[in-house]
Amino acid sequence: MIINPLKRVYLALESWFNLSFGTEWNPLYHLGTLSFFLFWIILVSGIYLFVPFHGSLEGAHASVEAITHQQWYAGGVMRSLHRYASDAVIVTVLLHMFKEFASGRYRGFRWFSWVTGIPNLWMIVTIGITGYWLVWDEMAQYIAVGSAQLMDALPIFSGAMTRNFVSGGMTDRFFILIEFLHLLGQPMLLMFMLWLHVKRLSNVNINPPRGLAIGTFVALLALSLVAPATSHAPADLGRVPSELHIDWFYLNVYPLLEIWPPGQVWMLTIGLTLLLMMVPWLLPKKDGPKAVVDLDNCNGCGICFEDCPFDAITLQARTDGARYDHEVVVDPALCAACGICAGSCPASNPFRTPRGELKTGIDMPQLRVDELRRMTREAIEQMNTDIKIVVFGCEHGIDVLGLENDDTRGVKLICSGMLPPTLVEYALKYGADGVMVTGCRQNDCYYRFGNRWTRLRFDGERKPSLRARADRERILVQGGAEPDAPSIKRDLVGFRERLRKLKQITLAEAGE
Amino acid sequence: MADMDKKPLRFLLQAFNYSLFMGVVWFFSNSPSVSLIGEDEAKITIAFSHAGQLREPCRMLSQEELNKLAPNMRKLDDCPRERSPVIIEAELDGKSIYSASLPPPGLFGDGGVDVFYSAKIPAGEHQLNLKMNDSVRVEGFNHQFARLVTVEPAQILLIAFNSKNGFVIKPASK
């Protein structure tokens, strides 16, 4: 399987973090929640700083200096936490973008999340800019004049704003406007945009694992103590600041104003933003056919509604006169065509109609559960060895067909979450000695929850669960990406040995 | 992925990763620094808003013209709204540093002009000459300013204009 170079970089990074943090705490799996956690730090530290802050041209710098130095152990630390957490958010957001892009999770059904995510980055940056403005030091002066130049390049201001600043038009009232924007206007808008960003997702989690949150906070605290955030000299509009230690996470556009006219800086930023927003259509990928509901086999139990990672399924009152209260409806615009719903449907039970066609409540036109059962049966029949292993795997993890040999056959699913647990029982009952289920790396499912739901179903913690009578000794669940193929092959060898021993024991017991 | 069993090593790796993360955060939150002006440089800024004079003077209407108008429209004078462009030239030590002809903005060309120019200059003593024409009815420049100015390193020499005093060197406010 060919992996694009960006994905290879991402997978290497992911492997490194899995080694360091384990799959539960891997920060790459929690970049969104980590960003939220950093926002909480910014919010709490911001509230603390707001109380003694003096929002005026004369008082701002002095009050920030007092907070920083007279109360270094509290206010100073809070200021540093506020600043470094804000910087860290840019890192987590950029990594989040990189991850989604490298792993192809930005196009097709995901276009909405990608497109609504790009402006969020700019929104965060503008909040940072107004934050630095409030300190009213030389850097704030640099921001004020630079921002005015950028605004003046727009047809609505036509040069008035920069003139206003340099000729003494920066007033306390304007300062209060910036304060209002930073404390209320921009954060409110960001909250709305974040809501929009995750609107097409279900089971949205905003809290990272506790261990990761603690580790991140301790690291930020340590940095705050080792290198406290400080201000530049107070703003002086009569002088040009000679050297500024600018925050490149937020102010990277401003140095461009030294070499380019503001209009060109706008063109670059707007052009780059539009280019990023258009990426889902510049590098398109067509989604598969969407899930289809068969009301004759749907009792409206709602498990697929619970399991759908993309909020594509809704429950509504029954329309076909059947005795059930509800029926499910799929919104094709939201459906990712992952098949997790087919795996969750209790009617996807291959034992229901051993001979006839297996019709289920919700199914994938491109890979029906009936077809899956047929493929499983054929895979078992193709093997003529003492040990027979069926490997179910998804399209985004390791290539299951690459694991095939005389005693091992692969059955490719759209997502591992598409596998009805009863199909594992079915395979074991109809001749397979063992069943291996692969998929994406644990906690990094291409379809968000496929491998997680599979594990929970197999552990009996989520419906439809694998029944207790299914011999767990003969089942192996091991996710992994393409670079993990050697380790998965080793696991498969071990699994084969285990099955062989189990068979010997069974034969011995039968002999006795 | 195989998880590591050795917890101390894992914590060590985590500490390394957190340190790297915080190192990146710390470095780019302060560095690299930006130098905005050289040690021997200053800045001259010409910034003001000014409306050019009316292109045509107001004209008193004759009785005959007034009679043609409806009684409620009989305003004694007719003042065309369009203003003159503002032509400005600035010289430093005899060399032209800024020259612009700024048309009045607005649908009817009756708005005030925003003049803004800013550039680095060597610190020290300079002969500054400013000329401005704000009326198409005047030949040449009807506002002139010549002054020997001394600018300190990093100072912003702020030039403004108002109708009452003409060009002025403003002390920039904080």
Image: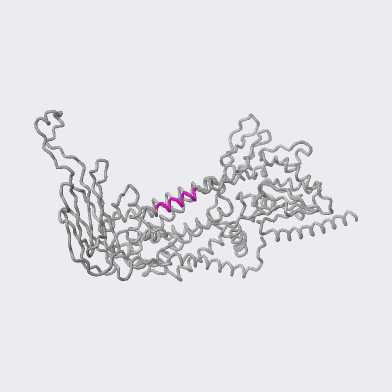
Residue farthest toward the left in the current orientation of the protein: B63
Asked if A184 appears above or below B108 in the picture, the reply is below
Which corner quadrant holds the N terminus of chain A?
bottom right
Residue A467 image offset from top left, x and y in percent: 73, 48
Residue for point 14% across, 42% down: B57
Relative depth, front residue between A123 and B95: B95
Q: How many marks?
A: 0
Please check the rendered image and state whether residue A271 is part of the magenta-colored stretch, yes or no: yes
In percent of width and height, residue A429 lies at 80, 47
Residue A442: quadrant of the picture? bottom right
- Assign the C terminus of chain A to one quadrant of the image: bottom right
Q: Main secondary structure of the magenta part?
A: helix
Image quadrant where residue A315 sits = top right
- Is A207 within the magenta? no
Eyeballing the image, is A511 above or below A365? below
Decide if residue A8 is on the left or right side of residue A156. right
- Residue A20, position in %: x, y? 60, 65
| Magenta residue span | A266-277
Residue situated in front as seen by the camera: A438 or A46: A438
Closest to the observer, A507 or B115: B115
- One can see residue A274 in this view: yes
In this orientation, does residue A171 appear? no
Q: Position of residue A441 (x, y in %)?
A: 64, 56
Give A440 or A10, whichever is nearer the viewer.
A10
B21 lies above or below A193: below
Name the residue at 68% across, 33% down.
Answer: A296
Rendering colour mode: one colour
